[in-house]
Image: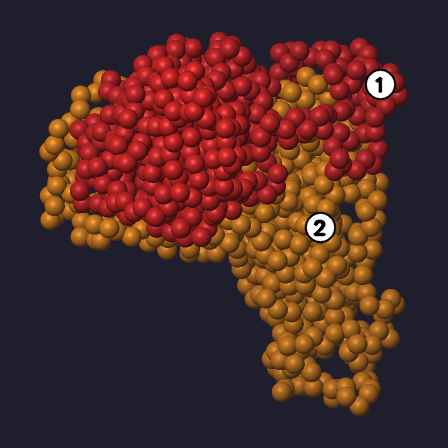
Amino acid sequence: MSTAGEVPAFFKSMGSDSPARPRQKFCGMFCPVEGSSDSKTLDFDALSACRGKSDGRVIDRQTDISQPRKVEIRESTGKEALQNLDDKRSDRLLIKGAKIVNDDQSFCADIYMEDGVIKQIGENLIVPGGVKTIDAHGGMLMPGGIDVHTRFQMPDRGMTAADDFYQGTKAALAGGTTMIIDHVIPEPGISLISAFEQWREWADSKSCCDYSLHVDITEWHKGIQEEMETLVKDHGVNSFLVYLAYKDIFQLTDSQVYEVFSVIRDLGAIAQVHAENGDIVAEEQRRILEQGITGPEGHVLSRPEEVEAEAVNRSVTVANQTNCPLYVTKVMSKSAADVIAQARKKGTVVYGEPITASLGTDGSHYWSKNWAKAAAYVTSPPLSPDPTTPDYLNSLLSCGDLQVTGSAHCPFNTAQRAVGKDDFSLIPEGVNGTEERMSIIWDKCVVTGKMDENQFVAVTSTNAAKIFNLYPRKGRIAVGSDADLVLWDPDLTKIISAKSHNSTVEYNIFEGTEVRGGPLVVISQGKIVLEEGNLHATEGSGRYVARKPFPDYVYKRIKARSRLAELRGVPRGLYDGPVCEVSVTPKTMTPASSAKTSPAKQPNQPVRNLHQSGFSLSGAQIDDNVPRRNTQRIVAPPGGRANITSLG
Amino acid sequence: MSYQGKKNIPKITSDRLLIKGGRIVNDDQSFHADIYMEDGLIKQIGDNLIVPGGVKTIEANGKMVIPGGIDIHTHFQMPYRGTTTVDDFNQGSKAALAGGTTMIVDHVIPEPGTSLMEAYDQWRQWADEKTCCDYSLHVDITHWNDSVKQEVDNLIKEKGVNSFHVYMAYKDYYQMSNSELYEVFTFLAERGGIAQVHAENGEIIAEEQARMLQMGITGPEGHVLSRPEELEAEAVFRAITIASQTNCPLYVTRVMSKSAADIISQARKKGNVVFGEPITASLGTDGTHYWSKNWAKAASFVTSPPLSPDPTTPDYLNTLLSSGDLSVTGSAHCTFSVAQKAIGKDDFTQIPEGVNGVEERMALIWDKAVTTGKMDENMFVAVTSTNAAKILNLYPRKGRIAVGSDADLVIWDTDSIRTITAKTHNSAAEYNVFEGMELRGAPLVVICQGKIVLEDGNLHATSGVGRFIPCSPFPDFAYKRVKARKQLAVLRAVPRGMYDGPVSEFSMSRGGTPSASARTSPTKQPVRNLHQSGFSLAGNPAPCGPPTPDDVPIRPAGRRIVVPPGGRSNITSLS
């Protein structure tokens, strides 16, 4: 172990704190010898078990800080600062004495960041002089949160969601989230690329933290497929959302979903799905309106949770058929979560995303006598009226059956909601939650003992980064990762209120909820954006983070399966017996559903019309391609699938 | 006794029948008693009956007497692209009687676009001419519009049909959209009908079929590969969801796979009114035969949903049938000759679908479920006849041995062993999907309409004696629960003051997409279009409101509803 004196002169002052702070005398029998911990290697004792709050050194250090167990941020002063005149000061940052929490383990170490990237992790790092230093005093330092589902600045019938990218990302940062993934919603008929570029433009000019984009598929035809390819190859998009709800607007038919999923799998992207049965919802809405129920309670009555579970089940089926990884956005109800958990048990590659609202509150508020309050909860799928739902979802999140959390942050202000004051089906949908997400999960899951701090990191950032192929750049504290960090205070208590939140809307659906745990310091791109409750977000500083296709976390299994799933025909002699005469109409083949209008809606066409199908009745094509000789065709045993026994 | 005989000497003796010393097996209990029948009805049950003289007497010697089987799902004489299934109503019902089934329920399949009523009349005519046993009819709804709705109403009210079948498969042909299913179910729930579904996701099947054919798989194995059991399970799940929304009793025809059966049993656990019907084929054999090198044999197994290639499926389904999770059994008997099947020799999608099973049904269930100890003889009666009779609202006329019930009886021999083969079966098809199977249990005597039709292995069926048995709506077995729930399920709005704050400007474009629907279902209207919804912007509540009878055109706060907020019991109001 080398001491500070043995290091080259250039680094003389490193490893100790800045000269402004006098050296401390250490006391106590079991305290380390002074200077001995100024090691340049990792201290494995500290790695395995954190030196923790009761560590003598921490107590000792408290003598020179005003508030016990608070962070301390020191700027370099005097001569040291002069060394760095040509640097931008805040680009270099040292966090000392933090307990680093990743999804797999926690350990104590210092972290040094430069240019927005983590450069060193360890004890007694050699860092240039004049570095801004944060003394964490054993506080938890975790990867900044990733909010996988936001809808900032979302256009809806000429209105725009109340929080734009600036307001929204500010709220995110205030809550400890340092990256968001927003949804691009092209109006049907608009090109995906142009919508994507529009969103890029909005976000680049306003976003205060790094961001990425999901693209929603709101209609389906050949052109869309090409655009998806371009988005994946040239624009760093690896996730697409399809809607099973919003009949006649965004909704796709099962055939279309099948085709979209097939394309997504070939591109190596993730299929996201808004899972609600739009047909049934439409019918129920009509029925509820006919009964004279026009308030927000009609919203939840017309979208019962069964309808959500049904759609989840259907999309799992389609995903299984197409061997495509599935990601269910906005898991709002117990039964939907159960379907996902069951499917995972059976081996389906499916991920579930509960949102802040479903983890933190329930749908009983739809019956509030205050219309504006009730309307503030309107989102789809709706919050479940069953008050035990949040607890249940938190349990599944803790055990790993649900993997990631978003916020689906898409608030509208009361005047915008009032568009639907006489008809709940017109109320613009969306709730807040990007700011509250981390704290709610900490409060509901970690404080209650459902999950530990590592699982907390997994569900708030790491899993999201893995699924969307951002790992380990995001979602992990490691050398080379982005310097998006949160110093988390588990004891901070806060009462959520619309008065103090960073969103622009008048209602906060978590109003009055007291949460324990919150960010003390938030570092985004290596810069401190939140300290002592002050937010220093810079509009437009957020970068677009491109994502590559075929994330390992998701596609390793998919690839292995697609190799296994080859099917083979049975070699048989030609059937040469008598063949019955039939009338012309062939039985099944259908026009390909790639046509823009869904085939289910084609009016009164003779559906079995062969000529539309692109298929030939005789099967001659197939015979041409593959000569049907017994010996030549297939050598493999009959039965393409593992569970099929051949009887010969 | 003898003096009574004098009066009735002219009568044909076989109208009067006495079974002595039988053990009567109903679905609830078994007991020893004699049975006396006259004019096709059971007149007396008990010991030492006083019966007229000259009565034909059968000595049962302690053998089981069970209600004749009801095969709730057949497709006799079904037209298919210009040909007809090889078993017509005569051949088919003869096979049924030979197997101990004394009543069949056939499916009327109107071509899409044609009248339900005409198809019904056509089927009635065919069946009345030829059937040898009593029959009833399901009607399949292959398209949906207002006139179909009217016809369904008439069929229920006047024609004695209480069960209607819809398809979730056969895309662009029979298949219904979710919205249509919702409407059909809603309508049936109002009128007291049973909604039957053919549960498979037709859209995905169409995609998979195209994929298989592209891969060069054209044989019958493509049929099962393009219809994996997940698609069946998915559709069952969806049908249950819609039925639960509409509060309509659901009947899933042809449960062919474990996963579909699991969904049904789960739904029943959650309280859904749903019945599952495994068929003879799914209870007795599996889908490995699709890989047979003999094309004709492989093709003879083609039915939809397909037999599961998992060989443990039959055992599993028998277990669920025994535990009551599945309720009734049919045969889906729909046989085609090899030449007919060969229509699809180069393309499995063209193979006409259907397997045999009407004759084998009773013996097969006895062999697979009773001799293995999965179920007892009473449960056997329940799944082969009683439950079906209850669902069709024919109980206790059918499906029970009781005074006043129809004299459709079977004396069941539990010891006889028979090997099934196409050489001896009564169907006209060349292949039997149960070929070579050895079954214990067989009917010794079959009595239909009070007449002996099977005795010593000889069948004396008479063509055209079968009567149409009308089924009335609202069967208690299904509807008692549904009715109770309907009363509970009334929804109520929350009374609020008028919202008088600012309102944003917005464009209606999002909801305004013109409906692409062609089948003229009213549901296909754009959902968010306010003007079509019968609503006015002014906040007038809809003028209906049975739940809120004190509706007034304008909503003064505090006047409207007295009930506590929250229409459902599990909702806590926070006001």
- Callouts 2 and 1 on one subunit: no
Q: Is residue A73 above or below residue B146?
A: below
Q: Residues within 10 Å of mark 2 (few under 14, many from 20)?
A: some
For this rendering, which residue is in front, A453 or A178? A453
Q: Is residue B30 visible?
A: yes
SS label for mark 1? loop
Chain red in the figure, letter: B
Residue assigned mark 2: A391
For this rendering, which residue is in front, B180 or A300? B180
Quarter of the image that includes the N terminus of chain A: bottom right
Point out residue B405 in the picture as x, y percentages from the top left corner: 50, 26
Q: Residue furthest front?
A: B3
Q: Is residue A140 above or below residue A44?
A: above
SS label for mark 2? helix
Q: Residue at x 42, y 33 (%)?
A: B19
Chain orange in the figure, letter: A
